[in-house]
Amino acid sequence: VVYEQEGVFIHPSCGKNDDQDNLISGVLRVIEKENEVIVDWRPLDDTLDTSNILCAGKDSSSVVEWTPTPKEKCPRGADRPSSYEAEWDMVTTVSFKKKPHSNGDATTHANGESKWSFLFSLTDLKSIKQNKEGMGWSYLVFCLKDDVKLPALHFHHGDSKLLIKCLEKHVVLNESPQDKRVLLVNSQNKSLSQSFENLFDEPSYGLLQKLKKDPYTVTMGRFSKVTNYIFDSFRLSDPSSQRRPPSEMADFLNDAIPGLKINQQEEPGFEVITRIDLGKQPEVSRREPVSAEEWAKNMDSEGRILNVDYIKRLIFKGGLCHTLRKEAWKFLLGYFPWNSTKEERANLQKRKTDEYFRMKLQWKSVSEEQEKRNSRLRDYRSLIEKDVNRTDRTNKFYEGEDNPGLILLHDILMTYCMYDFDLGYVQGMSDLLSPVLYVMENEVDAFWCFVSYMEQMHQNFEEQMQGMKTQLIQLSTLLRLLDSGFCSYLESQDSGYLYFCFRWLLIRFKREFSFQDILRLWEVMWTELPCQNFHLLLCCAILESEKQQIMEKHYGFNEILKHINELSMKIDVEYILCKAEAISMQMMNCKELPQAVSEILGIESSSVTPDSDTGEDESGAVLSCPTSLYQSISPPVIATNGTRDSTQQTSEMQGLTPA
């Protein structure tokens, strides 16, 4: 049950002058069941009983009474699945049938249950009519696809808007141009959602199985494994007999993803990139992970990091040995300031522990009755529980149904909703938290590291999707500079907006690499070397690696989506890190780097006096992020007393601020 509201009334004799306006109080629910989302209203005393449901046949416009035996299934068309339970066995329309009565009461069965109960599947909903503002109790009228209208539901306790908000998580509602009180269900969006699998489901290729839970899930559900077979199988036709043009499917994608349609003429950041010779990609090698000994040597007697830039370069080139991650990640994520002492960090942890448990107590102390009246908290809890149950169990830390790791995941995410109630919980956040909790092995430290990570990532989860939109634009700009021919091919296959990279960007490749590989990838990215938006260069590296197969096999829109999705768990993390670093070196060494690319990578230029020895380009500008920043790794200067030379320390710490 994702929505429940008492005090929703039917006025059975409303509008009849010769009959009293009797009120039937009931409970309205929105229920998720397998691959159905059901709207269900029944009087308060009713329990689920299929004998209360009246169905119309698939091609029938008349409503007929249904009074089967308790286990009898609803009559179904030939195309209905046979696995549904009786109470969820919907045909095209589901309604009620009103019977004459003399005493003004609702008609009842012999068992005393009301004949007014009804339920219907959201797939059968055509429109919703609302009352005029200020005209008595708020009410809603549901109209189904054969124009059968269900009785008006009067919300005596208000909150009809909460129901609309809940339904918008599953279907797109648009205001009717003829009547602003009428909300129309976007049928084109339904066709699309039937054609794309959930991006967060297992990587195997199959049919859409579940209706999704929130706008983000629905949106992501449109990026994954679409093929003509999926379109046709939902129409119960032979896949070989009908084909949907790829361009039409691309139009569906562009039109039905709110906030993500990109207009190259209007969006900032687009620049016409002419063909530029970037030169050959240099050979790049990686080193061994940073050892505990190397880490300790770069720390003074009070626990300060001696040379932050040096240690970051080491981590970028090789990552960290696992024993160091619990400590080093706190610095990389910004939980610990780089220039803090051991004592300062211990005091910080004490304060943060108190703050965390105060927030945790807030939601822990909410009673069931209070939560019933707080729909947002209820929704957050429901989404968190479902996502936590889908956590990758390949890691022993999260094995088993009652595993402590899963319980901590749930508690940390619920506490985060208290910390940032406006953003709350959005699907995908659990993917960002699970590796952090695994490394920290501590609830409080994991929470605050996650908070710091979300400060970097929050734009990915905002409702307007501006962060995702910006990254897709930037990725397109970089890829066009790197390989304009490949970009042109993708555009010719209606794939130029790179929507198939959505999952990569949203959760930073969490579903593309193994659990251990993602630990390495994330810590490298958190160094913020060798440039801004290095994760976009990782995307370029993956796409460039797949370019040959995509172009030589003439992949179209469907095949590109399928191929990219099936790369999950098949990408070599060390190879991709080397390739992305080589691409960054290519671009930073380019003398004619377009301004848009310089801004994306954070490569600022400054005018200098021409000097052949300065490494300047032909325009008299010097790149502020030279290749040597991460290629040349030299140890810090250490004084005999174990502390860093003071003059070097002063110069290196300038510009660094505590997290």
Image (spheres, helix red, strand yellow):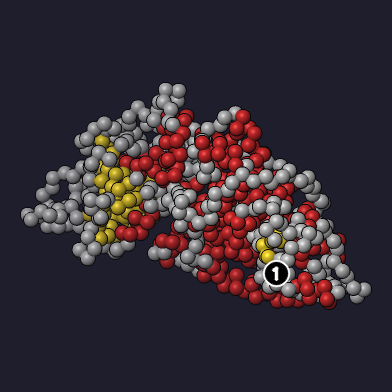
Q: Position of residue 268 (x, y in %)?
A: 50, 56
Q: Quadrant of the C terminus?
A: bottom right
Horizontal side, residue 568 vs residue 375: left or right: right
* Quadrant in which residue 457 is drawn: bottom right
Q: Nearer the viewer, residue 478 or 192?
A: 478
Q: Residue sitting at 46 percent across and 51 percent down?
A: 265
Q: Is residue 497 above or below residue 4?
A: above
Q: Position of residue 71 (x, y in %)?
A: 35, 35
Q: Residue sitting at 88 percent across and 70 percent down?
A: 638
Q: Residue sitting at 46 percent across and 57 percent down?
A: 464
Q: Residue furthest left?
A: 18
- Residue wearing tag 1: 336
Q: Residue sitting at 32 percent across and 62 percent down?
A: 159
Horizontal side, residue 148 vs residue 575: left or right: left
Q: Is residue 342 visible?
A: no
* Quadrant in which residue 571 is drawn: top right
Q: Nearer the viewer, residue 510 or 99?
A: 510
Q: Is residue 372 above or below residue 98?
A: below
Q: Position of residue 94 (x, y in %)?
A: 28, 40
Q: Nearer the viewer, residue 221 or 141?
A: 221
Disc 1 packing (10 Å; few <14; some 14–19; many ≥20): many
Mark 1 is on which residue type?
Phe
Q: Is residue 267 visible?
A: yes
Horizontal side, residue 316 vs residue 412: left or right: right
Q: Position of residue 264 (x, y in %)?
A: 48, 50
